[in-house]
Amino acid sequence: MEHEDVDMIGLETNDAAELDDMKKRLKEMEDEAAALREMQAKVEKEMSSVQDPASAAASQANREEVDARSVFVGNVDYSCTPEEVQQHFQSCGTVNRITIRTDKFGQPKGYAYVEFLETEAVQEALLLNESELHGRQLKVTAKRTNIPGMKQYRPRRSNPYMGARSRSPYVAPPYFFSPFGYGKVPRFRMPTRYGPYY
């Protein structure tokens, strides 16, 4: 009887320790869930502010203002660094940022954007059109502002490998009679392609 009482006391303390441990884990999980809810609310708030038309108009105006201070530079040598492009355009005014576009593998696409601090520098930079950098003639034009949703419409080109497919309904060719009669073919017909066995 005494041994049973001792075992029961040991089990109760063991159960109490497990219960405390489970309560701690539950509290940690609740804290983590609360933190996740808070982060999600924060992200949703930011997303809704991005979709807000007033802020979208403000960001569009800001983008237009930045584009008014920028130039597009085409035919840039692939080995050109941003520092070399900056030195080339340093005479026009203070260069704020240089962006050399790259493909998904990190290779330069051959063009760049140069953003200046002042708008007057753009006119000076346009004078550098057809100047040489790394032995290549640069094409310098004012940067245009991309308006979202105003993609230039290009009609679908026909694929020469797909045959002449039109969107008109199918019309069967006119029926004509064989000059040799039904099921008959000319006797001395040339083979359609070379066959070594006939």
Image (cartoon, rainbow, N blue to C red):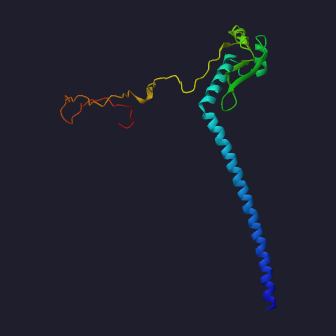
Q: Is residue 116 left or right of residue 47?
A: right
Farthest residue to the bottom: give it. 1
Residue 162 x, y percent position in the rendering: 42, 30
Q: Can you say which quadrant of the picture contains the C terminus?
A: top left
Q: Can you say which quadrant of the picture contains the N terminus?
A: bottom right
Q: Is residue 87 left or right of residue 78?
A: right
Q: Residue at x 72, y 10 (%)?
A: 120
Q: Considering depth in this image, is 77 or 102 the residue closer to the camera?
A: 102
Residue 116 occupies quadrant: top right
Q: Is residue 79 visible?
A: no
Q: Is residue 177 left or right of residue 2?
A: left
Q: Residue at x 63, y 38 (%)?
A: 47
Q: Is residue 87 visible?
A: yes
Residue 119 occupies quadrant: top right
Residue 141 occupies quadrant: top right
Residue 35 x, y percent position in the rendering: 72, 51
Q: Residue at x 74, y 22 (%)?
A: 98
Farthest residue to the front: give it. 54
Q: Considering depth in this image, is 108 or 140 the residue closer to the camera?
A: 140
Q: Count numbered badges in the picture.
A: 0
